[in-house]
Image: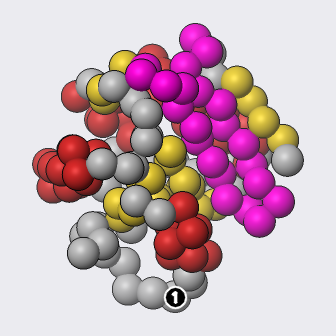
Amino acid sequence: MERIEVDGGKASVALREDGIIHIIWNSTVMIEAFDATAAMAAAYELTSGREHPLLVDMTTTASLSRQARAVFSRPSVASRIALLGRSPVDRILANWSMKVQKLPCPTRFFDSTAEAEKWLRLENTPADNRTQP
């Protein structure tokens, strides 16, 4: 598995053997536009610009700025995005972000890594931006 540390040291991005891009944000980071841009640039570098499913581990992040959300709402190498969180607060923040941002691909929130990975591997499913119940 190839891994790149994001400029600024707030995250790492890996292209896993199963073809999933995995962004892991470090504990208690505040994600700003620069960080989001650097993470997506690393994903682009790892995939040579080809689309792959994206797993974003946000379980320990402190915050995500409005400008960072705007970066993540741009088309990228992500074919589908699974947001992984742990708490009800993570779910509320993810739901709110998905409702106010026009997302470039199907995006869902999960509190289970296994469920997120299962959904990312699905093909030919209806595109939607709703969260999992």
Q: Which amino acid, mark 1?
A: Asn
How many circles with numbers are drawn on the protein?
1
Q: Say whether residue 31 is visible.
A: no
Where is residue 33 shown, x and y percent of the image? 38, 22
Q: Which residue is drawn at 65% across and 31% down?
A: 12
Where is residue 24 shown, x and y percent of the image? 58, 37
Q: Which residue is drawn at 56% across and 84% down?
A: 123
Q: Which residue is drawn at 44% across and 53% down?
A: 84
Toward the front, the furthest residue is 87
Q: In the picture provided, is 61 more to the left or to the right than 52?
A: left
Give 63 or 88, whichever is nearer the viewer: 88
- Above or below, 61 against 80 in this view is above
Q: Residue at x 33, y 25 (%)?
A: 62
Give 35 or 49, whichever is nearer the viewer: 35
Name which quarter of the figure residue 28 lies in: top left
Give 79 or 25, whichever is nearer the viewer: 25
State which region is magenta.
8-29
- Above or below, 125 against 36 in this view is below
Indicate whether residue 23 is drawn in magenta: yes
Where is residue 83 shown, x and y percent of the image? 42, 53
Where is residue 25 shown, x and y percent of the image? 52, 31
Indicate whether residue 57 is drawn in magenta: no
Q: Name the residue under label 1.
A: 124
- Above or below, 112 against 56 in this view is below
Quadrant position of the C terminus in the picture: bottom left
Toward the top, the furthest residue is 8
- The image's colouring method is secondary structure
